[in-house]
Image (cartoon, coloured by chain):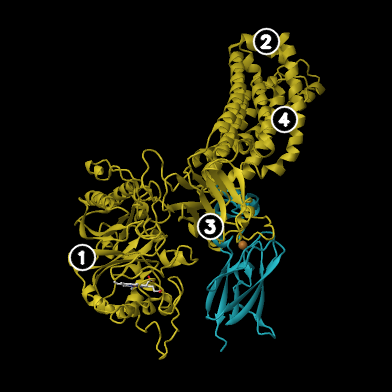
Amino acid sequence: MIRRLVALLTVVSLSGCAIWGTEGGPSGAGAAKPTATAEASSVPVTASRGADGVQRIEITIGDDLRLRPDTVRATTGTIEITFRNSGVTPHDISVDTVPAVDGGNVNGGDTRTVTVTVTQPGTYPMPCAYHVTSGMQGTLEIVDPS
Amino acid sequence: MRDRLAGWPARLLLRVLVVVAASAGVVWPASAAQAHEVAGAGATNFRTTLSALAPAVSGVSLSVVENGSRLQAVNVTGEDLIVQGYTGEPYAKIGPDGVFVNDNSPATYLNTDRYATTVVPSGVDGKGEPRWRKVSSENVYRWHDHRIHWMLKTLPAPVAADPSAEHRVSDWTVALDYGGQTLTATGSLDWVPGPSPTLWLLLAMAIAILVGAGGILPRGGYRLLAAGTGLLLAADLLHSAGVAVAETGSLAQRLGALFGADAIALFVWPFGILAAWRLAYASRFAAVVAACVGTLLGFSMALDDAPVWWRSSAPTGLSMTVDRVTVAVVIGASAGLIIAVAALGLRSALRRAAAVTAAEAAAAVARSGTATGESDVDAATQPASEPVGSLSRDDGDEGGDTGRGAASDGGGREGDVVAVGESGPSGVARRSVAGYLAASGVGVVAGAAVGIGLRTGDAPVSASTSTTGPALSDVGAARVAYHGLRQAGIAVPVRPQAHSWVAAFDLVDGVDAKALQGLLRQWSAAAARLADGQGVGQPDDHLVTGSGPCALTVTFGFGPSLFGKAGIPETARPVALAPLPAFTGERLDPGASDGDLGVVVAADDPLVVFHAARVLERIAAPVARVRWRQTGFAATPGATALGSTGRNLMGQVDGTNNPKPADPDFAAKVFVTGDDQPAWLRQGSYLVVRRIRMLLDDWDRLTLDAQQKVIGRRKDTGAPLSGGQETTPANYGTTQADGSPVIPVNAHIRMAAPAFNNGAAMLRRGWSYADGDRAGLLFLAYQADPRRGFIPVQQRLAGNDALSRFIRHEASALFAVPGGVPDGGFVGQDLFGKDAA
Ligand code: HEM
Ligand SMILES: [Cu+2]
């Protein structure tokens, strides 16, 4: 009897636990897990250098609280980063160079461009002021041009 | 006759109600998902903890309310308290004139919604002058603070990978400005898995079977259903009241929580009460209504609230166990009512079929009706055309019962039953059951509504001080909770307290596991009381009478030598807890080094530290003896500017480049998070203690310039010699005119920095010590693994860095610091596994 019950429970939990929202059923069955693509997005993308010598990159920010790409590689110099908000939740990404450059609020559907000039090679975090507790942070990797 | 008439209005009312119920059932599922949530948050495994608000100010308190959904600030002082927004701008102002929000802060717009799906008007950036808008004239404000809770609708990756383990999701800080100083609230967001739901599911099934039996039992079946309906209503009401109590909002919001979304309960509960009442008079139609009510309440409960069975917390004023029971009762009783009505329907269908068969066989004389096999059914008195769902009573169930009292049993009409009831003892019982159910149902609903309406605020977990009696200073009143996911005294409070007592104990020979566990249990209980500012019930409590807890923390650790004693196998010793290797130049005093158990007591008052240390020593006496002890000190709170880094006895600013709680990798550097360490160490840390003597006479002979080069930082500001301010990152590439580096190659910071040690990092949290002519640094460092912290760094520094000439390591110890102590538990209990006594 108990064994049947457990079997039934398992069937229910595997199929229908999503009705209980993000956290799902017992032992996390049916929980809303981050998608594989969300996890495997840490491939650095290099900013492309324009004729004027400025390096440019567009980063998409969305309701999944991720930056895509989440790691941008560039060389020392001026970098222009455009944040495109593809979702509905506002974000505010800063580039934590010294001193930090605050991108300001970007509402859903909006874009905003920030320009930073970096002279020191290193890795600089790009956290979202609203969502950093939930892990919304990218990285700017600056290397020597040589 | 009068009674027969009296039955009709009730019958009519029920019929009208059932139509309403049916239509309510159509709209119900849509609103069910929002029912019984507080501010958009239901049962959850995420846990937001506020660990400290420092410095504490009496009259100002902060707390996490609505199960982590919001923060609440209370300010009863005469000065404004300003909550900083996401980029440090002023966001909300709570003060004597009421509560104001800054329309020029993005937080004002973001914080209106739990998931911040809002729009910030253009031009609002928090940079300009605040535009204050008054929102209330109270002295309390509650807001969704997105720094304290999980903002995604998918789980964090580590949690998704292993949902049944505990995880530290993040650490958070929220800053508040008050009277020219910054109050920092620090806390954490954790994933705490809940229990197994099996027990509660079994309870619900047992209740379902019990109530469902009401549809089959020949005797007392309806009374069982009436009781089941009453139980269902009571449990649903209790559950809803619990939710309403957790709601901290306005009266309307609290009543909304009580009655569910769209106040649906206001429509459903009256049906239930009426059905329970009519059920006591054995109305089959009432059973159908009760089943409808049960379907509505039970389904919404299962959809919405069943997760309380397997999640660790829920927004409720009830204890989790009581809350889980109410959910099991509602779901179980509802299922029971549905089963019962199905059984009733089946039985009367069978009976009708039997009656038809009997008629066809022309066996009119066979009045015994035995053909059906149901000896208690009098086929002749049961009209075959009786429709299911009418208000007529079902004689089949009650016939035998009422037959006891009166000769009119054969009548079988409702009005007669009432008459019978008046003369028969069981009828009286039924009527009073019905009366009580109806009256108490209405009374409880009204009472709960009034109670919840009148309730003025609750007592949420708070990191602030109580304001009874003459106010203590900020320093005295500061309180750091002993219980938590991690031990206090490591990352909390952020600034090390002004006084400390660091000691090691050795177990007395022959102590067994039970005695050791007893000691740890008593130590934990005492530490929890002392941290809360309470005495331990001994005469020497008067040593601290009148003083507050002064941010007292007690941190316990296990030394390598503990393993192999008191029944703990040597093999249980974590690999990382191997005794430290010997380092160049050290001259260690074995009597002042190592030890089975390590204890760090720290507080902002020397008497409070002394008292706590004595209490712990006394508790240990029969089981463990002090091997060595050392007191330490730092600047008195208030002596230096708030938030400034302390200085050591060489006069340097010391602690600047420590890992910060707000760093994303803070926990990974300082706390044991990985699976490569034993489970009892999870959320724990490794503590290295070194008593480092400073050769101050030699040091004093150096010029200021030479002293600065030894460390690589300026003595006045603590700024790196490469320029900038204290917090400016050091630039190790900056060179002087002659091409030599500005920060010399053997400067202490160059040789100690993680960048030059493969990332090896630690949280230094030491104190100065001075005993007679010996003085120096009581160096304490916490790290996730000493092999990726103290050991490689010290191997590099020893004998090599410029500081080596002016210091001498004289004592040393290493301890594994277990994770935090749950309320009712004791430190390190997981080390003892199942045999924990
Ligand atoms: C009496 C002995 C010591 C003194 C007076 C001393 C003093 C200092 C000072 C003034 C700083 C710069 C400010 C700061 O970032 O905190 C510093 C940094 C540091 N010290 Fe020490 N220290 C001592 C011993 C040690 C030992 C034994 C270790 C570890 C093996 C150590 C590890 C570090 C680390 C990791 C830093 C930070 C380097 C960076 O990332 O910039 N120190 N120390
Ligand atoms: Cu964001």
Label 4 with label 3: CB-CB less than 8 Å: no
- Front of the two marks 2 and 1: 1
**Amino acid at dot 4:** Gly
Mark 4 sits near ligand 2, with its Cβ under 8 Å away:
no
Point out the tag, 2 or 1, that comes first from the N-terminus: 2
Q: Look at 28% across and 78% down and name the residue there.
A: B804
Q: Quadrant of the N terminus of chain B?
A: top right
Q: Amino acid at mark 1?
A: Ala
Q: Which mark is residue B592?
A: 1
Amino acid of disc 3: Pro
Instruction: Relative to B686, say whether B76 is above or below.
Output: above
Q: Earlier in the sequence, mark 3 or mark 2?
A: 3
User: Residue B315, percent across and down?
Assistant: 55, 44
Q: Residues within 10 Å of mark 3 (few under 14, many from 20)?
A: many
Q: Which residue is mark 3?
A: B163
Classed neighbour count for the residue bearing mark 1: other residues with Cα under 10 Å, few (<14), some (14–19), many (≥20): some
Where does label 2 land, which residue?
A: B419
Q: What is the secondary structure assignment of the residue under circle 3? A: loop
Q: Are marks 3 and 2 in contact (CB under 8 Å)?
A: no
Colour representing chain A: cyan
Residue B547 percent coordinates (x, y)? 31, 45
Q: Earlier in the sequence, mark 4 or mark 2?
A: 4
Give the Cα separation between the discs numbered 4 and 1. 83 Å
What is the quadrant of residue A57 in the picture? bottom right
Question: According to the colouring, which chain is yellow?
Answer: B
What residue would you read off at disc 4?
A: B345
- Residue B350 at x, y = what percent? 73, 29
SS for dot 1: helix
Q: Which residue is depicted at the point 23% across and 50% down?
A: B614
Is the residue B696 above or below the residue A119 in the image?
above
- Of the two numbered discs 3 and 1 on the same chain, state the one appearing first in sequence: 3
